[in-house]
């Protein structure tokens, strides 16, 4: 008996619903926090620091959040971490600086991710992982799509006329975190437990680094980890760059610029759906070409001056991104589950991907602080993506040809 689409196991639907509600609140909160910064008169380079605050906890906590998820029922871990996110929102509502409040939200997010993605590999057999990842990606991006729209509405004049202030916008998001925590109660316990390692802090760190190296040195694991690390670092930066570009190049206010982000989200949904339907797990490395296309589209986007054309190109950017990341993420989860425990492998993945996000957002904020124009930033970022993923694609083909000759 199944409760999820596509013949996926019972309980997967509850997982999708819970993570959708949580991600919807996260994405809407980011837009509201940007509006708070602008209302406080802070400069534009503060905006990417919100994301830095959100993911800062992922990197130092990576050695512990994976074992934590593996030692307990992952649905319960997700519910508790949602309450931590809610505490961050309440702190922002009470007047804490938005960047610091987002750092508290990030504490919850850091513990949430290994439990969520670890559950995918525990609930779903390997042949269905690409399909499961497609559905997860669709719900993640659907949450980004609706979250950007919800955030845009919560900072619009229409809503603020009712709520009176941005504090009212924050209060409206409390229900979403509570809803997500409630849905987690319906996720079945897979029964998987792995006791945390004894011996204190240093052995845990050593084991984490050993796991990190093991995944990087694996042929398929290292390839997929490199590709997803680049993708998520660029994706986080692009989220802010598109908002800035739409306000400067297309003269859109923040709420309408947030709506324009929806084109990227729709594209990712389409690309993820296509990958889940037509790309087998063993063919995942072939999809690196889509990442190269993503990079080459970004300099074209930077030159656009009309909203319809911008929406079309952003749709294409999202589609090729979704087509690449879903199969490679499934391959990474598959190899991680084979080499490591589910939660630990996701923690390793999160550590590398979020370190990339921190580095790229830091460079992006620095470039804005130094006055570099947004068009040059988008062009440079796109060419960097195309070159990096193109190099991985050539390396993959060379290894495949070598294996054929050897065989």
Image (cartoon, rainbow, N blue to C red):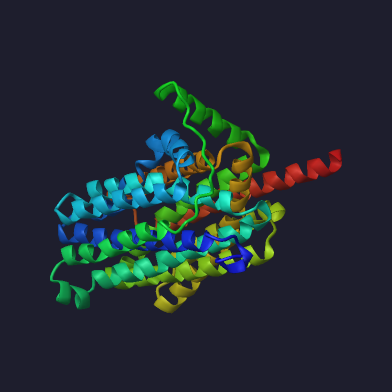
Q: Position of residue 290 (x, y in %)?
A: 61, 59
Above or below for 265 versus 350: below
Q: Is residue 9 left or right of residue 256?
A: right
Q: Which quadrant would the N terminus be assigned to in this image?
A: bottom right
Residue 366, visible in the rendered structure: no
Q: Position of residue 136 (x, y in %)?
A: 52, 60
Residue 403, visible in the rendered structure: yes
Q: Is residue 252 left or right of residue 144?
A: left
Which residue is pictured at 39% across the width and 44% down the height?
111
Front-most of residues 303 and 219: 219
Q: Position of residue 143 (x, y in %)?
A: 41, 65
Q: Is residue 98 left or right of residue 339?
A: left
Above or below for 161 versus 37: below
Total count of labels: 0
Which residue is pictured at 54% across the width and 63% down the height?
135
Q: Position of residue 95 (x, y in %)?
A: 14, 53
Question: In terms of image quadrants, where is residue 398?
Answer: top right
Question: In terms of image quadrants, where is residue 128?
Answer: bottom right
Which residue is pictured at 49% across the width and 32% down the height?
195
């Amino acid at each position: 008996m199944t409760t999820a689409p596509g013949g996926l196991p019972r309980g997967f639907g509850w997982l999708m619903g819970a993570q959708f509600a949580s991600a919807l609140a996260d994405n809407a909160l980011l837009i509201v926090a940007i509006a708070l910064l602008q209302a406080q008169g802070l400069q534009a380079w503060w905006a990417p620091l919100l994301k830095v605050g959100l993911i800062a906890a992922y990197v130092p906590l990576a050695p512990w959040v994976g074992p934590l998820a593996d030692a307990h029922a992952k649905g319960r871990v997700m519910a508790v971490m949602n309450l931590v996110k809610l505490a961050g929102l309440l702190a922002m509502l009470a007047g804490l600086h938005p960047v610091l409040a987002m750092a508290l939200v990030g504490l919850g997010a850091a513990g949430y991710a290994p439990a969520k993605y670890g559950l995918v590999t525990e609930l779903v057999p390997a042949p269905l992982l690409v399909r499961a990842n497609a559905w997860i990606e669709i719900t993640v991006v659907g949450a980004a799509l609706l979250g950007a729209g919800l955030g845009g509405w919560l900072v619009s004049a229409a809503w603020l006329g009712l709520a009176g202030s941005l504090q009212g916008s924050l209060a409206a998001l409390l229900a979403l975190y509570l809803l997500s925590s409630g849905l987690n109660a319906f996720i079945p316990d897979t029964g998987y437990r792995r006791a945390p390692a004894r011996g204190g802090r240093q052995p845990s760190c050593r084991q984490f680094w050993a796991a990190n190296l093991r995944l990087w040195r694996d042929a398929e694991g290292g390839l997929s980890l490199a590709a997803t690390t680049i993708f998520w670092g660029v994706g986080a930066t692009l989220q802010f760059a598109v908002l800035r570009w739409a306000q400067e190049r297309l003269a859109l206010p923040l709420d309408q610029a947030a709506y324009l982000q929806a084109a990227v989200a729709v594209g990712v949904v389409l690309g993820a759906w296509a990958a889940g339907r037509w790309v087998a797990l063993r063919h995942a490395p072939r999809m690196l070409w889509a990442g190269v296309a993503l990079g080459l589209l970004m300099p074209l986007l930077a030159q656009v001056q009309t909203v319809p054309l911008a929406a079309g190109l952003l749709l294409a950017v999202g589609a090729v991104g979704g087509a690449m990341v879903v199969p490679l993420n499934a391959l990474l989860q598959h190899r991680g589950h084979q080499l490591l425990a589910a939660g630990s492998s996701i923690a390793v993945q999160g550590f590398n991907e979020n370190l990339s996000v921190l580095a790229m957002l830091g460079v992006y904020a620095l470039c804005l602080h130094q006055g570099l124009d947004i068009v040059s930033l988008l062009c440079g970022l796109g060419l960097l993506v195309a070159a990096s993923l193109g190099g991985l694609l050539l390396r993959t083909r060379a290894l495949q040809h070598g294996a054929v000759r050897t065989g």
